[in-house]
Amino acid sequence: MKFEARLFLYLTPFFIVVGVIYGFWSSWEAVGSVGLLLVGGLVGMVGAYLALVARRIDPRPEDDAFGEIEQGAGEQGVFSPGSWWPIVIGGASAVCFAGMAVGWWLFYIGAAVAVIGLVGWIFEFSRGQHAH
């Protein structure tokens, strides 16, 4: 995680400097100037989050400069073998984007379906509080 945190944290000043330079060159054009500065802020937030996570977890084999490939072998996490909920969320996102062009009523329908899909995806493997 340390490499990823450094990558994002080193990009933060780049985007801020580029945003300021672009702002001066374009007489502070609203979309580009604000967009570049916001990208700098967002990259900084991602970098700060990754730095916090890197402090809390043990070093990974990827963080070791002399690490071997076999150190990373084994189970990498728990993944659903066949979940349909990401398809529901993707379809709902498409409906939301279409709703921004067609009408807000369609956006609200897509947002409701997206919330249902997100809740379904989060609780897909939940068996309840007192399950055995």
Image (spheres, rainbow, N blue to C red):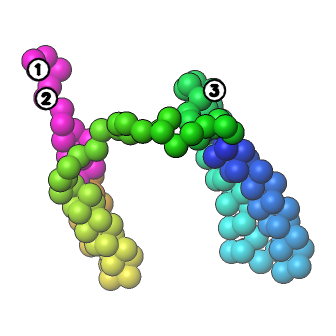
Splitting the image into 4 quarters, where does residue 30 fall?
bottom right
Q: Helix, strand or loop at disc 3?
A: helix
Residue at the extreme left of the image, as rendered: 132
In reply to whether residue 117 is colored magenta, the answer given is yes
Q: Which residue is mark 1?
A: 131
Name which of mark 2 and mark 3 comes first in the sequence. Answer: 3
Residue interval drawn in magenta: 116-132
The amino acid type, in three-letter code, at marker 1 is Ala
Q: Which residue is mark 3?
A: 55
Residue 113 appears in the figure: no
Splitting the image into 4 quarters, where does residue 57 fall?
top right
Q: Residues within 10 Å of mark 1 (few under 14, many from 20)?
A: few
Task: Out of 113 and 10, give the one closest to the viewer.
Answer: 10
Residue 127's disc is 2
**Left or right of 127, for residue 32:** right
| Residue plotted at (29% across, 65% down) | 90
Name the front one of labels 3 and 1. Answer: 3
Name which of mark 3 and mark 1 comes first in the sequence. Answer: 3
Marks 2/3 in contact by CB < 8 Å: the verdict is no
Q: Does 15 sit above or below residue 21?
A: above
Splitting the image into 4 quarters, where does residue 130 fall?
top left
Query: How far apart are the alpha carbons under marks 2 and 1?
Result: 6 Å
Marks 2/1 in contact by CB < 8 Å: the verdict is yes
**Left or right of 111, for residue 44:** right
Question: Percent position (x, y) of residue 16?
Answer: 80, 59
Task: Out of 38 and 56, give the one closest to the viewer.
Answer: 56
Q: Residues within 10 Å of mark 2 (few under 14, many from 20)?
A: few
Name the front one of labels 2 and 3. Answer: 3
| Residue plotted at (22% across, 61% down) | 88
Question: Percent position (x, y) of residue 118?
Answer: 27, 49
Question: Percent position (x, y) of residue 18?
Answer: 82, 67
Q: Helix, strand or loop at disc 1?
A: loop
